[in-house]
Image (spheres, rainbow, N blue to C red):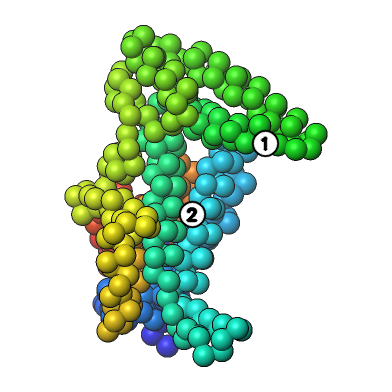
Amino acid sequence: MLKKLIKNIFSFFDKKLDMTDKERELIRQEFKRLNYPKDLQTAHESYKVILDVGWKVYKDHVGTNTTVMGQDAHLLYQMVLLKSISIQSLAEGKGYQNDLDPAMALLGDTIDVFGIWNLVRSQFESVCTFNHIYLFPTDQKQKELLYDLWQVAGLKYRQRFAINLEGEENIKKAATELKDIEFLTNRICNSPAFTSIHVDEQTKIKNAVKGKDFQWYFDGSRVKQGAWHQLCKNMGTNDLFDNMYTYLSLSTHPSSVSIFQFKDLYKNKDHVQVTMFALSISKALISFLIRDYCTYFAECRKTFDNLPIVDQLLVNFYNSTFREKKYQINDIGHYI
């Protein structure tokens, strides 16, 4: 009954939220329950709320920008959400039965935590990439240049497979993509964002094209290279998120640290707490993306503002906690 009541309380965001003190207190309690889950079941419930918000915002506005660049933004967003569904599934646990040796089996609630971390790390990179291309640049021409640089990098990596291609259709496709690389490279070099900077800075971009590296960004009239942790900083994250990419990498690569962690992971059900932590990091990343998506596609704000209040509070919490208050999508929390 409590959940149903809370889900039926909507924010019309006219700054005149017509609620009783009791209703406000119920919302605070529900927010606290979901935001600070005490068990894995509640953590799943909280994760589902964030995921549902992401899909709802996407569904209502997926066709709003028909440019190639805009459609790629929709697709990148969708890829992150699909990974969330996989994370959700892995976090529920899976069983295993060996047909060759029936005595060899895993219980149905066995969680592959390191499999989850792999997906969370991929989400990290995708969320950073979305912000890097679509939000961080202050100038539209800079966004377009970084978008083209991103395309060239991907297409150039695909050309590595060209020498092993078989079939006329695949060979033609590789040849077409080679022409696309030439076209995009010329467009980059003729872009106002490129021609307006010093020749030394232009050289950096040319080298980025050659090196298949898109992780460059504009800092005034300068062009700088940024590793993933720097792109995360550019996204506005604070010191609470420092070294997160290193942590994710240690948990996904076959490092000695990951082996050490795995050795004792399933003793005393420690994997449950680690799974809850992984879900919380994924929730933060999805919340970052929802905010950036609603910023780039401004029409999404209307959908977000009409979601259940608790849902809005949860997304805003992760943005204000791990970024800054200005990264909240709205100030609904002020009225609760």
Q: Residue at x 38, y 85 (%)?
A: 2
Q: Nearer the viewer, residue 121 or 70?
A: 121
User: Which residue does the numbered mark 1 point to in the structure image?
Assistant: 164
| Between marks 2 and 1 in the image, the one whose residue lies nearer the viewer | 1
Name the side, left or right, on which 318 lies relative to 191.
left
Quarter holding the N terminus is bottom left
Between residue 108 and residue 12, name the one nearer to us: 108
Determine whether, in the image, residue 86 is placed left or right of residue 5. Answer: right
Residue 259 visible here = yes
Residue 200 to residue 51: above or below: above
**Residue shown at 60% from the left, 83% from the top:** 100
Q: Are marks 2 and 1 in contact (CB under 8 Å)?
A: no
Q: Mark 2 — residue?
A: 80
Mark 1 lies on a secondary structure that is: helix
Which three-letter amino acid code belongs to the residue tagged 1? Asn
Tell me where residue 324 appears, x and y as whole percent.
24, 49
Residue 314, quarter of picture: bottom left
Q: Residue at x 28, y 75 (%)?
A: 264
